Amino acid sequence: MQSTPFLPGLSAVRSKPLTALFDAGSMSSDGGIVLLREIALRLGLADVVSGPVRDVREPARIRHTYSEMVTARMLAIAAGYEDCDDLDQLRFDPAFKIGCGRAPETDQDLMSQPTLSRLENLADWRALARIGIGFIDLFCRSFRLAPKRIVLDIDETYDAVHGEQQLSMFNVHAGTRCFQPIMIFEATTGRPVAALLRPGKSPSGREIAAILTHVIRRIRKHWPTVAILVRGDSQYTSGIVLETLERMRCDYILGFAINAKLKSLAEPWRAECLRRQCLPHRPTVRRFHTFAYRGARWSRSHKVIARIEATANGSDARFIVTNLEGRSKHLYEKVYCARGAAENLIKDFKLYTRADKTACHRFEANQFRLFLHLGAYWLLHELRRASPKRSPWRGATFETIRRAFIKIAVRVEEMKTRIKLSLPANAPNKVAFIALTGAITTAGP
């Protein structure tokens, strides 16, 4: 007979011996998985990722569907288990079995790491393209009503590699071999639109124009009349990108890297700001100037805004190019600078879902992994958005959300007619957990 494991050598409490046995029955430390399951079902996340992957297995021998495998992987990532190896232990966890739609005791256990790894290496570029389109469609479906205007923030980040992964390159700025994924988020909601793994080099104007064309066309297929504003840093400003956005009837406000001509043009403005900064009680002087400018490879002139600033440490000039109407100060400080929020969204994606876990050799497998982490981002983001607008949870990090609402002990009992979940009576965030559940389950599919 197998003995029950225990914790040895615990100190007594008020002269009473302290014993700890692993005999509490079917329990999980991730009770909040049931909330993520509801979100995944309402978003249809599993179909977005697994639907385009062609299943060539023999039907009679299938034990785990691709939908179940993708769901298990995304739930695990959202719960903080970013490695595929983690499923070797989680496959027995009753909460994760429920998350994948399986009875905790009478149904078979979940899939193991080798099974999941085979799936991750199965997708070809056609399937990946359809998954990418599926995520854009998911973004559009997530709105109850078609918005009048959306703001697309495009940015890139570096993803360090530690081997000979396909298409990895040495990046001088990052100082290491890496990928350089491009991310697109909708600024007002924080929802992701696209995540594309790409070589570790700066994208060309033609590449950026092609990406934006595909994304905007797909969005306009759902919302033909929506107004779209595209924001980005200076690496996204080129003649072909500006022409593409204007041809597609999009607004844009993009950074513009300084060059010798702009530096010469800004010199009198710098001198004026420095002169004013020397006056009493003027620690900082900031001025804005608007002018028409035509780049060397631009087909025509575009509106450029210069921001000139002088402080005790010297002067600085920055430029943006835009087709928006309005005061220069407002366009720069309120519209363009708000683009910085996209960096926080990328941090959520990279830091809290560990989206840089792209250690497969094949580029296609790494892109498929990126989509799995994008699905986990959707789960955590929608869980956070389900909280009341004025609650502190709306501004919490994914890690805070995870610790408060996912990492909850739960006892699972499978009965003849129902499955009973017993959560701690003194759970610290019990009221908020109940409110979140109600908000998610009443939101509809």
Image (spheres, rainbow, N blue to C red):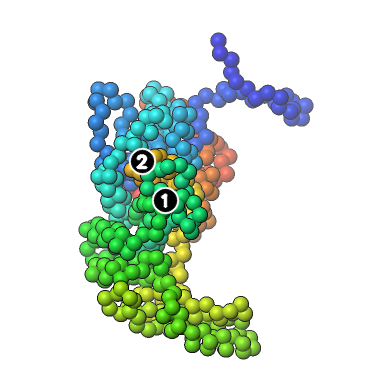
Image depth: mark 1 or mark 2 in front: 1
Q: Looking at this view, is 147 or 442 the one in front?
A: 147
Q: How crowded is mark 1: few (under 14 residues within 10 Å), some or many (20 or more)?
A: some
Q: Is mark 1 on a helix, strand or loop?
A: strand
Residue 83 appears in the rendering: yes
- Residue 142 x, y percent position in the rendering: 32, 53
Q: What element carries label 2?
A: loop
- Residue 58 x, y percent position in the rendering: 24, 25
> Vertical placement of 429 versus 190: above or below?
above
Q: Specify whether 200 is left or right of 4.
A: left
Say whether disc 1 or disc 2 marks the residue closer to the N-terminus.
1
Q: Looking at this view, is 395 or 264 the one in front?
A: 264
- Residue 388 x, y percent position in the rendering: 46, 55
Which quadrant of the structure image shows residue 249?
bottom left
What residue is rendered at 63% in x and 22% in y? 6
Which quadrant of the structure image shows residue 53?
top left
Residue 250 appears in the rendering: no
The quarter of the rendered structure image containing the N terminus is: top right
Q: Name the residue under label 1.
A: 169
What residue is rendered at 31% in x and 34% in y? 66
Q: Which residue lies furthest to the right in this view?
A: 15
Q: Name the residue under label 2.
A: 362
What residue is rendered at 33% in x and 76% in y? 296
Amino acid under label 2?
A: Arg
Which quadrant of the structure image shows residue 77?
top left
